[in-house]
Amino acid sequence: MGTGSWGKVKRQERMSREAEELMHRLLRQVRAGKSLDRALSGVAEEISVSEFKLIGPSFITCSKRLQLGDSAEEVLSDFAARTGVRELLLLARSIEVAKRTDGNVGGVLEYTISVLEERRETETEIRALLHKKRFERRLMMVIPLGIFGLMFLVAPDYLAPLWQTVPGRLAALGALALMGLGSFFASRLFDISA
């Protein structure tokens, strides 16, 4: 993964965290008895661009459309499309469906937030497991070389046939090739992109 894509992933993670906080604030407004339109306007008034650096300006711009008569669903869909944050896309679709079916917007918000929090926890657990497995893979590559080095120090005559005879050289070269191939396949196995 290149530096540019790492920065993009980190930016997307920050945007997701900001979106989650924005949803919590929206839920508080809806729980206070406000309609979705008023809740969106209320959240737009209470947030600061310094607090929501990545999605704040776009949210404020989109929420101004409410004053022009656009529906809350259109505003949320546009906001989600502008940011590209998957959490907001899910929220916009969920609220669209809730509005069409006369559902409980507060309940939909609550459920969406809980699903997103579970997803974040699961992703964190998967990331931790992958880091553990990557460390184990590296360790498994170093251990044979360490054992070889230790044997070379303790009993160099024992390993002499490995580099003094043609079959020994072929066996050592084959072992190194297999270790490299195993490392390649192991790195491919643990290369999971979200």
Image: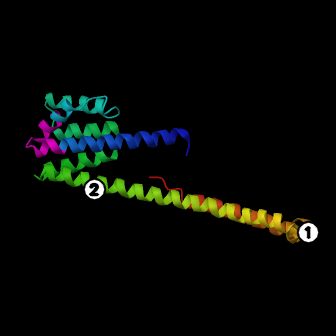
In the image, the segment drawn in magenta is 27-41
Seen at 19% across and 49% down, the residue is 109
Q: Is residue 60 above or below residue 26?
A: above
Q: Position of residue 183 (x, y in %)?
A: 65, 60
Q: Position of residue 142 (x, y in %)?
A: 68, 60
Is 32 part of what is drawn in magenta? yes
Residue bearing mark 1: 165
Tell me if mark 1 has few (under 14), some (14-19) or many (20+) residues whose alpha carbon lies within 10 angstroms of its own. few
Q: Is 114 left, or right, of 12 in this rendering?
A: left
Report the front residue among 95 and 118.
Answer: 118
Coloured how?
Answer: rainbow
Is 151 part of what is drawn in magenta? no
Residue bearing mark 2: 115
The disc labelled 2 sits on which kind of residue?
A: Val
Seen at 40% across and 55% down, the residue is 123
Q: Position of residue 48 (x, y in %)?
A: 26, 29
Seen at 38% across and 40% down, the residue is 14
Residue 47 at least partly seen: yes
